[in-house]
Amino acid sequence: MATGQGDSMWGPELTRGDGRFALLRAPVAAFDAELRGLRAEHFTVLPGPVTGTLRNRFVGDHVLWGSGDATNQGSSRGEHAVWVTDVRVPSDVHRLVLEHSVTRLEPLGSTGALVVGQDLFGLSLSTLALTEGGPVRSDSLSRPGATQGETRSHGFFFKPEGTGGGVMGLPVRMQGGSWSHLRYGSAEVSFLRVGAGLRLSSLGALEASTEARDDGCTRSCTDWYGNARPIFYRDRVFALMGYELVEARVTESAVEESSRVSYLQPGR
């Protein structure tokens, strides 16, 4: 079975073992202070990747998992596949082959999912429809030479729309190398529209200033909260990149910057 590396800093980012892990599904009453109500039949051993860092995500009644490289976001290391099962029938596991690794899994509503990873050329995104017959790959989009700018959960946001689609934002950078998502700032926050059938289309990006913003970690520290994220607040859209907060207007086909402020500038 796969095991983690403990709860110390960066420990949860790393796994070891044969790739198998277990899905726990038990009555709420079984969760007491000592977990004495849990029994062997509450666990289902699942297959999984044997290389890379395990990622998993629940989407509606489904759970998805796969692997990528936690330390080097520019690497395509990890199995180029995603596993999916319905938690109501966990023994029925589907393995869907991809052209890229799995470094992020996110819900797109209750019946759709986004898989983000790396191939040999750069950043790749795939959308999956979670149907009764199993997962179906709906669309894909590539960004050659790019990697994720922020790997933690707050680096992604999807705002659904009444039409069944929505708009999502993801920090992107162009540098690679070990732990580069902590050593370098994000070059931009990219926005994409999710249309009918989970089809992806680029809306463009809000770019960070090229001016150096290194303050020696006296006002900020990338290690603790990340340096970039998209923000959807009611009908407004923002991109936070380091010390800059950029507001934008999203149209049907593009994202357009409307204002920008830097927290390093003296207050007016």
Image (cartoon, helix red, strand yellow):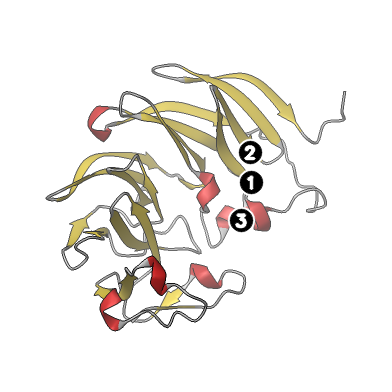
Looking at the image, which residue is at 26% across and 60% down? 87
Give the spatial CA distance, label 3 vs label 1. 8 Å
- Going 61% across and 74% down the picture, which residue do you hit? 8
Do labels 1 and 2 touch, CB within 8 Å? Answer: yes
Q: Is residue 61 above or below residue 166?
A: below
Name the residue: 28% across, 53% down.
61
Say which label, 1 or 2, has the lower sequence index.
1
Name the side, left or right, on which 163 lies relative to 132: right
Residue hosting label 2: 241
Which residue does the numbered mark 3 point to in the structure image?
A: 182
Three-letter amino acid code at the position of disc 2: Met
The quadrant of the rendering that contains the N terminus is bottom left
Question: For the residues marked 2 and 3, what is the alpha-carbon distance in whole angstroms?
Answer: 13 Å
Reply above or below: 88 against 135: below
Would you say residue 140 is visible in this rendering?
yes
Which callout, 3 or 1, points at the residue further toward the start of the chain? 3
Q: Quadrant of the C terminus?
A: top right
Q: Secondary structure at mark 1?
A: loop
| Residue on which the image places disc 1 | 227
Q: Residue furthest front?
A: 29
Res. 91 image quadrant: bottom left
